[in-house]
Amino acid sequence: APGSWINQIINAGSDGAVTRDDVEDIARWFAERGAEPKIVITPYVHPSLRRSLAEAGFVLKTIETLLTADLPRREGQPALPPGYSLHMVDKADPDDVERYAQFASSVHFGDGASETLIDSLRRAVRDPRSINHILIEDETIVGVCGAERFENLGALWNGAIAPSHRRRGLQRLLIEWRLASLR
C-alpha cells in the first residue's frame, strides 16, 4: 500500500545496463498504484542506472550504511543487564506479533503511524526467515529487534529502543544478541 517502507526496487542495475525507459517504466508502475517510486542503489550498480535515474528526475533521499563481517564461532549469548529479559516473538501468537509491531512502529514512525506501516512490520515478523526479540524491563517493553537468515548470510533489521532507555548500551546488546543468534 502507499506509504509502506517496503515499497522499493532493490538490485536494479546489478546485472547489467538500465535505460531511462526502464526507470520510467518502474516509476509508472508505482504511480499506477499511488505509491512513491523508490529505487535502492549501491556503489556497485551498473553506471547506467545512476545516469538513467538522474535523466528520469530521481533524486537522492536517504543513504543506508551496509556493514559486513564474518561471524566467528563463539559460545553462548551476551549477558543481559539485571532486571532485563529478552523474549523471542512467537510468530503464531497474534498478541506477541502485535506487541512487537506496535512498539517498533511507535519508535520508528511515531504514534501516528499508518496501518500500512504497522502491517508491514507484522508481515516482517511473521516471515519464516526472521528472528525477532522483545526486550523487557520490569514487564515493560523497552526495545525490539529483528534479523533474517538467508542460507549462509544474515541481516539485522529493526532495532528500536524506547527513548527513555537510550544511551545504556541496549542497542549494542541487541546487535550482539542477534549476531549470536545468526551464528
Image (tube, grey):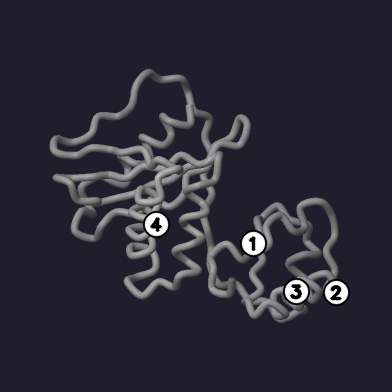
Q: How many residues crowd mark 1 within 10 Å: few (<14), some (14–19), many (20+)?
A: few
User: SS of the residue at dot 3?
Assistant: helix
Q: How far, Cα to Cα, is label 2 from label 4?
A: 38 Å
User: Contact, CB < 8 Å: mark 3 with mark 4?
Assistant: no
User: Contact, CB < 8 Å: mark 2 with mark 4?
Assistant: no
- Residue 143 vertical position relative to residue 53 in the rendered view, above or below: above
Which disc, if any, is residue 29? 3
162 or 100, which is in the foreground? Answer: 100
Q: How many residues crowd mark 2 within 10 Å: few (<14), some (14–19), many (20+)?
A: few
Instruction: Judge depth for marks 3 and 4 and give the one in front.
Output: 4
Q: Residue 85: which quarter of the image?
A: top left
Q: Amino acid at mark 3?
A: Trp
Q: Quick check: 96 left or right of 67? A: left
Residue 104: percent from left, percent from top:
37, 58
The mark that comes first in sequence, 3 or 2, is: 2
Residue 171: percent from left, percent from top:
31, 47
Which disc, if any, is residue 101? 4
Residue 77: percent from left, percent from top:
33, 26
Q: How far, Cα to Cα, is label 3 from label 4?
A: 28 Å
Q: Quick check: 134 left or right of 148? A: left
Residue 13: percent from left, percent from top:
77, 58
Name the residue carrying label 1: 40
59 or 105, which is in the foreground? Answer: 105
Name the residue carrying label 2: 21
Q: Amino acid at mark 2?
A: Asp
The mark that comes first in sequence, 3 or 4, is: 3
Q: Residue at x 20, y 53 (%)?
A: 165
The mark that comes first in sequence, 1 or 4, is: 1
Q: Amino acid at mark 4?
A: Ala
Q: In the picture, which quadrant includes the N terminus?
A: bottom right
